[in-house]
Image (spheres, rainbow, N blue to C red):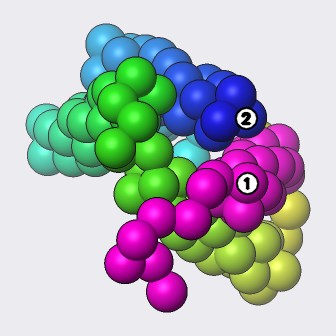
Amino acid sequence: MALARFVLIFTGLSFFGYAIACFIYPVEVVGRFTGYGLDAAAGLVEARAMYGGLQAGFGLFCLLAGFRREWTQAALTAIALVMGGLVLARSAAMGLHGVVGAHPGAAIYEGITTALALLALTRLPRQRGDL
């Protein structure tokens, strides 16, 4: 259970911290990392909503799950699916478009987080109703 709690809290803090930085400094954080042109209001709203709001919500969910045992399995599953989807899509995209910017580092973080979430899931006690 210690690994599960670590993964939940670390992921929650990572997502929430990054979300705050993206919301406050969208041009500096989102624009430079992604290469998006954020010179129009629509782009700034989208960056703040998706990189700030969505990630803050997911980060808070993971943090809460770190302290609510009944949410542990669902949150670890969400982390494995979200981060697994990110690393697979990012890796495929880098294969198509080339390795650029901070994407290799992001893929490493996403892959490690996916693996840790899956490992933590395998170590959870089985609950009634599980397949």
Q: Which residue is mark 1?
A: 123
How far across and how far down the image is residue 123, in percent? 73, 54
**Identity of the amino acid at label 2?**
Leu
Q: Which residue is mark 2?
A: 3
Q: Secondary structure at mark 1?
A: helix
- For the residue pair 87 and 38, the one nearer the viewer reads as 87
Pointer 1 local density, CA inside 10 Å: few below 14, some 14–19, many at least 20:
few
Q: Residue at x 56, y 65 (%)?
A: 126
Magenta residues (range)? 103-131
Q: Nearer the viewer, residue 71 or 7?
A: 71
Q: Is residue 127 above or below residue 4?
A: below
Density class for disc 2 (Cα within 10 Å; few <14, some 14-19, many ≥20) is some
Q: Tell me if residue 42 can be seen.
A: yes
Q: CA distance from mark 2 to mark 1?
A: 9 Å
Q: Earlier in the sequence, mark 2 or mark 1?
A: 2
Residue 13 in percent (x, y) is at 51, 20
Q: Residue at x 83, y 80 (%)?
A: 95
Residue type indicated by callout 1: Arg
Q: Looking at this view, is 110 or 94 the one in front?
A: 110
Q: Is residue 89 above or below residue 80?
A: below
